[in-house]
Image (cartoon, rainbow, N blue to C red):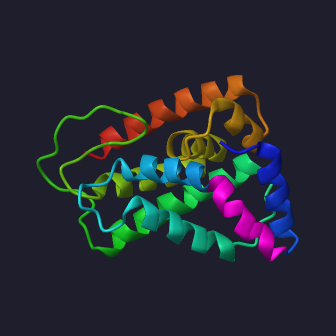
């Protein structure tokens, strides 16, 4: 794991237009991006078109085009997690998969993922549910995204959202319960 100060310094330099900072940043964040991508791919079917490395590269290419003013390592990783999730959702939607079908099986809520019998449908259902939660309570939706999809710790989520770790804990518990109820009602 790389020194947070080094990553933050490189991110700020990149924002200021230093192209070499971007190139220096990659080795410092690659391991963490790989961990986030693996976490995202965990819900995908075996043989998915995207491999972990391809997901990282696609996300990084999209992030290069984002004109963001990075607030540090946690902010960068949060955006990376969101971009990776959106890539997978876009891919699932683009493949024309049905959103819902008959014959669902009983499931448990595990790490904010719901498994159904249709390949890719759980990601689309979760994305739709997160969008509904975001319309009601954007902070709770963001906390779910940062912690479960981005793998950020409670303290890192608290830093990104500018709230306490205790508030992160409460938000995550409430958001998980809301998502569980919401996803179960879709069936």
Q: Is residue 23 magenta?
A: yes
Q: Main secondary structure of the magenta part?
A: helix
The residue closer to the viewer here, 31 or 15, is 31
Looking at the image, residue 82 lies above or below residue 113? below
Q: Position of residue 3 (x, y in %)?
A: 76, 43
Quarter of the image with the C terminus is top left
The residue closer to the viewer here, 173 or 54, is 54
Residue lying at the far top in this picture: please name it: 166
Task: Look at the image and give the residue range highlighted in magenta.
Answer: 18-29
Looking at the image, residue 181 lies above or below residue 66? above
Q: Please give left or right for residue 117 compared with residue 80 in the image.
A: left
Please tell me in which quadrant of the rendered image residue 14 appears.
Answer: bottom right
Q: Position of residue 99 (x, y in %)?
A: 27, 61
Residue shown at the point (53%, 35%) measured from the top left: 175
The residue closer to the viewer here, 7 or 109, is 7
The residue closer to the viewer here, 182 or 25, is 25
Please tell me in which quadrant of the rendered image residue 160 appears.
Answer: top right
Q: Please give left or right for residue 145 compared with residue 70 in the image.
A: left
Q: Please give left or right for residue 7 compared with residue 187 in the image.
A: right
Count the labels in the image. Answer: 0
Q: Please give left or right for residue 133 compared with residue 181 in the image.
A: right
Q: Is residue 24 magenta?
A: yes
Quarter of the image with the N terminus is top right
Q: Position of residue 157 (x, y in %)?
A: 68, 38
Residue shown at the point (29%, 73%) measured from the top left: 95
Residue shown at the point (23%, 65%) measured from the top left: 98
């Amino acid at each position: 794991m790389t020194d947070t100060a080094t990553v933050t310094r490189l991110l700020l330099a990149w924002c200021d237009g230093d192209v070499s900072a971007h190139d220096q940043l990659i080795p410092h964040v690659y391991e963490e991006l790989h961990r986030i991508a693996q976490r995202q791919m965990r819900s995908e079917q075996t043989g998915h078109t995207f491999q972990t490395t391809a997901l990282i590269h696609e996300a990084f290419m999209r992030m290069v085009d984002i004109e963001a003013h990075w607030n540090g390592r946690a902010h960068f990783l949060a955006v990376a997690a969101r971009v990776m999730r959106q890539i997978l959702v876009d891919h699932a939607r683009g493949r024309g998969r049905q959103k819902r079908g008959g014959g669902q099986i009983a499931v448990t809520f595990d790490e904010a993922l719901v498994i159904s019998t249709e390949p890719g449908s759980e990601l689309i259902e979760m994305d739709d549910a997160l969008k509904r939660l975001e319309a009601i309570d954007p902070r709770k939706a963001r906390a779910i995204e940062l912690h479960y999809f981005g793998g950020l710790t409670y303290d890192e989520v608290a830093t990104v959202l500018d709230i306490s770790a205790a508030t992160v804990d409460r938000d995550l518990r409430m958001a998980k319960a809301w998502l569980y109820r919401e996803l179960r009602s879709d069936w």
